[in-house]
Amino acid sequence: MNQQFCTFFLDKIYFGINVIQVQEVIKCTQITPVPLAPPDILGLINLRGKIVTIVDIKSRLKMNQNINYLNLENNYNIILKHKSEFVSLIVDDIGDVIEVEENQFEPPPATLKGKIRSLLQGAYKLQDNFLLILNIDKLLAKNIES
């Protein structure tokens, strides 16, 4: 059985999320900061009357954390509905929706260490790249360790 993933880039690394979890993808809009929010919560946006929490996915993955809050217009929001809440992940660039065969799936590469490995479901070998599949439930867990 084939799987479909919404793909995106963080620091030129190719990631994917199961398309079933994605509500929509939009260009970044004005973010309202939330006082006393954890460092990985960038703020909130109003999406057609729905309050959406903006998550700094790079911070959660312990990647480059140099987000310039004033210069996000070239980034994208991937809007997810997770446990009846709307959440957005800020990503550098958006890819395509791709379909991969299940027999291409592999567990997270052993060369990956630390937090990112624990937040991946696995990877797919593509012709010219690897697609790293994020485990959204783990990524968005409330008790995520810093």
Image (cartoon, grey):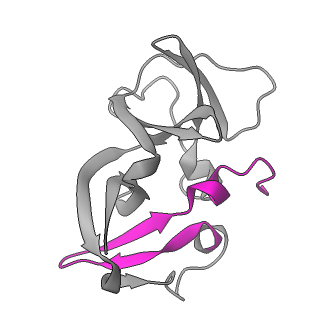
Q: Nearer the viewer, residue 81 or 121?
A: 81
- Quadrant of the drawing holding the N terminus: bottom left
Whether residue 65 can be seen here = no
For the point 47% across and 48% down, the residue is 21
**Compared to 126, does 40 lie above or below?**
above
Q: Residue at x 65, y 49 (%)?
A: 140
Q: Position of residue 126 (x, y in %)?
A: 24, 77
Q: Give the vertical position of 28 relative to 78 (above or below).
A: above
Q: Is residue 83 above or below residue 18?
A: above
Residue 134 relative to residue 95: left or right: right
Residue 88 in view of the camera = yes
The percent position of residue 8, horizontal first and vertical second, equals 34, 52
The outermost residue toward the top is 49
Q: Residue 39 magenta-drawn?
A: no
Q: Nearer the viewer, residue 102 or 146?
A: 102
Instruction: Based on the picture, tell me whether residue 142 belongs to the magenta stretch.
Output: yes
Is 24 displayed left or right of 66 in the figure? left
Q: Quadrant of the C terminus?
A: bottom right
Q: Residue at the left extreme?
A: 127
Left or right of residue 108, residue 140 in this image: right
On screen, residue 30 versus residue 65, left or right, reads left
Q: Across the whole image, how many numbered discs are drawn on residues? A: 0
Residue 73 rendering spot, x and y as whole percentages: 36, 26
- Which residue does the image show at 51% across and 80% down from the upper left? 108
The magenta stretch spans which residues? 118-146
Q: Residue furthest front?
A: 1
Residue 105: x percent and y percent?
Answer: 38, 81
Task: Say which residue appears at 58% left-offset and 42% top-offset.
Answer: 56
